[in-house]
Amino acid sequence: MIDNLMLGFDSALTPENVLWCFVGVLLGTVIGILPGLGSATGVAILIPVTLTFSPLTALIMLAGIYHGAQFGATITAILIATPGEASSVISTLDGYQMARKGRAGPALAISALGAFAAAMVSLLALVAVAPFFAQLALDFGPPEMLAVMILGLGTIVVFSGKNLLLGASMGLLGILIACIGVDVGSGVARYTFGEVDLFGGVPFVEVMIGLFALGELLNQLHHGMAAPIRARFKELLLTKADLKRAAAPTARGTVVGFLLGCLPGAGTTLASFMAYGAEKRFSRHRKQLGKGAIEGVVAPDAATNAASNANFVPTLVLGVPGGATTAVLLGALLVYGIQPGPLLFENQPELVWGLLVSFFIGNLILLVLNLPMAPVFAQLLRVPYAYLYPLIIATSLLGAYSVKNSMFSVWVVLVFGLVGYAMKRLNLPVAPLVLGLVIGPLFEKALVQTSALAGDDGVAATVFASPAAVVILLAAVALVAGPPVARLVRNRKPVPVTTGRKQ
């Protein structure tokens, strides 16, 4: 391990590589701030720019864009409830509430620190146990992934609050919306009504921009234009209490993110939701989640960063992308003439370990750039809302249009902006709907693949034949049934034992 790290530092720590790592991180942060672009689009757009670079330098720059976009997306999610990436959606729940309370600076700072800590821990784990987790990922077939998706659906219970039926209904609505498009198994179009733009499904990023950014803006306008936040500078800084509260959620988010990130196709979005669900179960301040709790910011962001690093396990070792952005990076590897697979670590160790070590460098640059800038970014909320609201609308619509250069994306934002506004007015939970949208396509894909694999044996028999799938399903049952059972046990009142009549 030490020899591999030394080889990696020797390959990555050249002036040229560090320079392009810095450029990638900076560009990635800007790309993440712009709604609709996202890291996958940013990496895809800039691949042609890197064709004249050496393969290692090119990959270092593209990986820098990937990591920078993660934090850039969190900036707008916290400040104006506009997630730039799918994985930053969950950060809006508590991050934006912290911003509304004048604590945007601490929210951004703890996000940067939590992401950096998760990156360092996950990278060390990646360097140490990449072959083991690659083998684990290889053993995870469709039945195991189906069990993981069922576990993910079980977290809807966590996001439902006190009204489980309402939360389940919103989750089901999200799954139904995710069903729009071409059926994975048969290739038949569903619920598209002849609209060609819907053949690819309802675009997730545009839906999130509408639900959160436009929905929140319309809700604010309904209540009357709020006064700009006038937080004092010291209120924009982290305190010791903030750091103490953030330690355990960062650790939990890192573990959840790394484990899910190692699975092919799981991506970072599911990891951020699962980390938030873990906080709903295990945090001492679980009742404050959704109201501006620092745990609700740092845990998902730690999970996102850990998962983004772990995504490279299946990508490099198996040649199977861990998520959307690593799928684009996999294509870049092939463009550079590099064949991912088990032999990559043996045949090109300088490239592999140089790339992995560049993650350390990139995350350190991100921390140095963005931690001092957190109070500066927070000053955006001092702008009068008469100027800020039109800027948010313009940015959201332009960002949506830039995804596919199509007015259809703009209409999706407007429609789901009205949906988001209606949900806020009716006090309907948004998180289960979003979780249904995220897990719906993944669940369907795993179900179709498991069904094809099972043949005459049936899906249930195939799933229960896998020990790993059974363990995951038991965890899902515990997640759903555990809290009600615990509540019943807690509420049982002991029957008083009478020893005789009072005198």
Image (cartoon, helix red, strand yellow):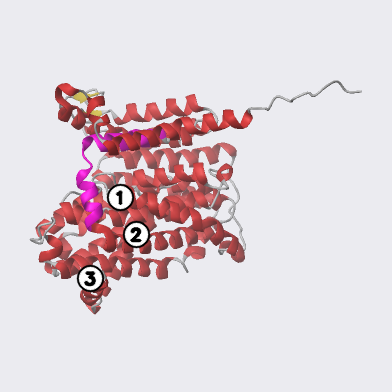
**Which residue does the numbered mark 2 point to in the structure image?**
122
- Indicate which disc, 1 or 3, sits on the residue closer to the N terminus: 3
Q: Residue 238 location in percent, x, y?
A: 55, 63
Mark 1 residue element: helix
Q: Residues within 10 Å of mark 3 (few under 14, many from 20)?
A: some
For the residue carrying disc 2, how many other residues have a C-alpha within 10 Å: few (<14), some (14-19), or many (20+)?
Answer: many
Instruction: Choose top left, top right, bottom left or bottom right for residue 29.
Output: bottom left
- Quadrant in the picture for the C terminus: top right
Q: Magenta span has 322?
A: no
Tell me if 477 is positioned left or right of 104 in this view.
left
Dot 1 or dot 2, earlier in sequence: 2
Q: Which residue is mark 3?
A: 4
- Residue 114: percent from the left, percent from the top? 44, 59
Q: List x then y, in percent, for residue 165.
A: 48, 24
Local crowd size for mark 1, using a 10 Å CA cut-off: few (<14), some (14–19), many (≥20)? many
Magenta stretch in the rendered image? 131-154
Q: Which residue is mark 1?
A: 261
Residue 202 seen by the camera: no
- Please say whether residue 166 is visible from this viewpoint: yes
Pointers 1 and 2 in contact (C-beta within 8 Å): yes
- The reply, left or right, for residue 350 in relation to residue 417 is left
* Rendered location of residue 202, percent (x, y): 29, 34
Q: Is residue 147 magenta?
A: yes
Q: Name the one closer to the observer, 156 or 331.
A: 156
C-alpha span from label 1 to label 2: 10 Å
The label number, if any, that marks residue 391 in the structure image: none
Amino acid at the residue labelled 2: Ser
Which one is earlier in the sequence, the residue at label 3 or at label 2? 3
* Residue displayed at 18% across by 23% down: 457
Compared to residue 68, the image places residue 149 above or below, namely: above
